[in-house]
Image (spheres, grey):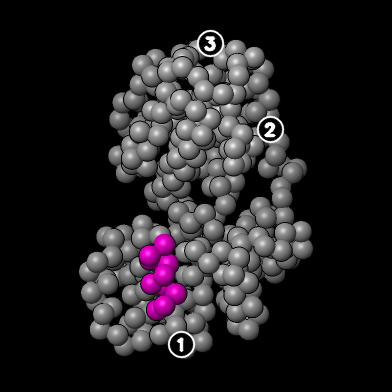
Amino acid sequence: MTDPDRVLRPLREAEPAIDSLDTYDSPVALLDALRATWHAVERTLRTLLRSDATAPDEIRMTALSPAQMPTETVLAELRRRDLISLELAGRLHELQRAMDRAGESEARPADADVALAVVSQLKAEVSRRGGGPAPETGRGLPSGTAMEPAAADEPDGARGPRRPLYLLGGVATLLVVIAVLVYPLGRESEMERGVAAFAQDSAGVAERHFRAVLEQDVDNVTARLYLGRILRSQGRTAEAADVLRAAARTAPADAAVRRELGYLFLDLAAPASAVEQFRRAVELEPDDPLNWVGLVTSLRAAGDPAAEEWLRRAPAEARTLIQNRPRGRQ
């Protein structure tokens, strides 16, 4: 059974930002609140997928890493496993499009309302799945209560505190639902095809799709990361090194890239170099247990007694993974 308290922790931690979606006083404040809220929502969705005991290890182990599992894949897996409703999936796609559109400066008041609706419904669905009572949604209104839409001619500037949430009207909601249903059937991107093939252990097919992505977007770090992992797993270490070095140049602060470089150094019998990469990954993303697993593994391979101290400091989930990990598995 899902543990709602653990899954919803990112949303609780982001409550100040979520609350400010109702009270922001400038476009900059709105954009900051939207970004923080979206980050918390995405983290909640990844934790929900990670907590699904029926999911394959490959899915659960990569769910928390944006570099290894794009948001689109997380949403697809959550729907495939019936962990979120079709209605919520539609709203999540709407919010994701709003964030893509906002970019650096162009957030809209209606985007805040979509974000608030997503947070309310996500809390309710996770709580129901965990067997607990659904929290109140819509700032005091029960889940499912209809609310008035925002005025179409509302300016994009600052708004006064607290106004009714904007929920998609019947026709708009239907269109979103149709888009969610149709998109996976006929409009999968090269990236999505590559991720799907990778999850099914079809390395050759996945490699072709990721190389196609890089032909269109040479700096796509996610495609380089997947491709590097495929090449490494096939013993093509020189090619993997080229791909991963390029990824590190593009995204030097990407923990997943650092982690994959660490495993490449382990494959090359250079554990001291691997330690440097895994330690950097832990610094960048201390909440990801896979970074701690790699660091302790590489320290042990290097014969460094500090491995046991790092093991004691590691999160409980990382310690469990290390204890249950088959020897030699990377």
Residue 115 in magenta stretch: no
Q: Which residues are magenta?
A: 275-284
Q: How much space separates mark 1 and mark 2, taking CA atoms?
A: 48 Å
Q: Do tag 2 and tag 3 residues touch (Cβ < 8 Å)?
A: no
Q: Secondary structure at mark 1?
A: loop
- Which of the two labelled residues, at mark 1 and mark 2, occupies the earlier sequence position? 2
Q: Position of residue 276 (x, y in %)?
A: 41, 77
- Where residue 2 sits, quadrant-wise, is top left
First reached walking from the N terminus: tag 1 or tag 3: 3
Work out whether residue 44 or residue 276 is closer to the camera in this orientation and state it: 276
Residue 268 picture location, percent across and down: 51, 87
Query: In the rendered image, which residue does mark 2 sit on?
Result: 179
Residue that mark 3 sits on: 148
| Residue kind at label 2, given as amino acid type | Ala
Q: Residues within 10 Å of mark 3 (few under 14, many from 20)?
A: few
Q: Observer-nearest residue: 157 or 39? A: 157
Determine the secondary structure under disc 3. Answer: loop
